């Protein structure tokens, strides 16, 4: 479910200290029935096991295939466009006690881990369109349960990056995030099978 940006910006997440030049663009919640205060690592593991980019299907898989093909044709994702050559990693803004919580090697998919704590984590990516952060947080719900929250923070690469983000907004809201919600929530419900 889509949430107001204030649901991210109004919480005391560590990420706020390091992204004052980024804009919180999208904030979504994912239901995790039966989750407790210490289940954030379990939710992350379930998503990694059952809901990665390689498991997309239908319209979402098509959109990602088109995006990666365009990126390859237009050079959006070439090595010189990403973290390091074009933009400095946010890890350089963070203390070692934070960055030491994860292996900085890129995982499956386009994101590179920044940190992972008991109730939040952040991953970054950069290409010719944008420098972005996916922030995941663990939030207590009014009924005493917990749910996963995702915020997408962006720093567009100039006018082109802003135009790109505006162009893909309908696809994010109508196709990508609803499919991600179904997949992540299903991974949580199926966590025992996925994680053995």
Image (cartoon, rainbow, N blue to C red):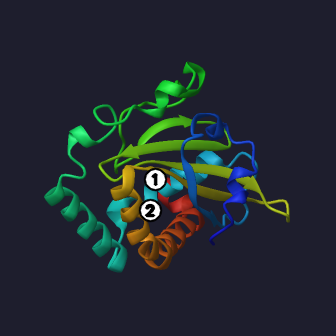
Secondary structure under the numbered disc 2 in the rendered image: loop
Closer to the camera in the image, 23 or 11: 23
- Please say if 44 is above or below 30: above
Residue 120: image x %, image y %? Answer: 63, 43
> Is 123 left, or right, of 168 in this rendering?
right
Number of other residues with Cα within 10 Å of mark 2, as a class: few under 14, some 14 to 19, many 20 or more: many
Closer to the camera in the image, 118 or 129: 129
> Is 10 left, or right, of 93 in this rendering?
right
Do tag 2 and tag 1 residues touch (Cβ < 8 Å)?
yes
Residue under numbered circle 1: 48
> Is 65 left, or right, of 32 in this rendering?
left
Number of other residues with Cα within 10 Å of mark 1, as a class: few under 14, some 14 to 19, many 20 or more: some
Residue under numbered circle 2: 51
Residue 163: image x %, image y %? Answer: 38, 64
Across the whole image, how many numbered discs are drawn on residues? 2
- Please say if 53 is above or below 83: below
Residue shown at the point (34%, 79%) measured from the top left: 59
Quadrant of the frame with the N terminus: bottom right
Residue 196 appears in the picture as rendered: no
Closer to the camera in the image, 68 or 58: 68
Closer to the camera in the image, 110 or 164: 164
Residue shown at the point (65%, 40%) measured from the top left: 16
Secondary structure under the numbered disc 1 in the rendered image: helix
Between marks 2 and 1, how big is the CA–CA gap?
6 Å
Numbered badge on residue 127: none
């Amino acid at each position: 479910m889509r949430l107001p940006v204030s649901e991210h910006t109004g919480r005391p997440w560590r990420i706020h200290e390091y992204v004052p030049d980024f804009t919180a663009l999208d904030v979504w919640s994912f239901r995790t029935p039966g989750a407790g205060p210490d289940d954030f690592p379990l939710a992350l593991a379930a998503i990694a096991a059952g809901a990665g980019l390689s498991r997309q299907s239908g319209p979402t898989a098509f959109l990602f295939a088109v995006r990666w093909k365009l990126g390859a044709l237009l050079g959006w994702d070439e090595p010189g466009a990403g973290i390091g050559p074009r933009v400095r990693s946010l890890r350089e803004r963070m203390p070692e006690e934070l960055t030491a919580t994860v292996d900085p090697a890129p995982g499956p998919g386009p994101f590179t881990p920044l940190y992972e704590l008991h109730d939040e984590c952040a991953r970054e990516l950069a290409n010719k369109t944008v420098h972005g952060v996916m922030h995941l947080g663990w939030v207590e719900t009014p009924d005493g349960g917990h749910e996963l929250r995702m915020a997408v923070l962006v720093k567009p690469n100039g006018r082109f990056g802003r135009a790109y983000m505006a162009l893909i907004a309908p696809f994010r809201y109508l196709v990508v995030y609803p499919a991600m919600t179904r997949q992540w929530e299903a991974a949580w419900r199926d966590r025992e099978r996925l994680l053995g």
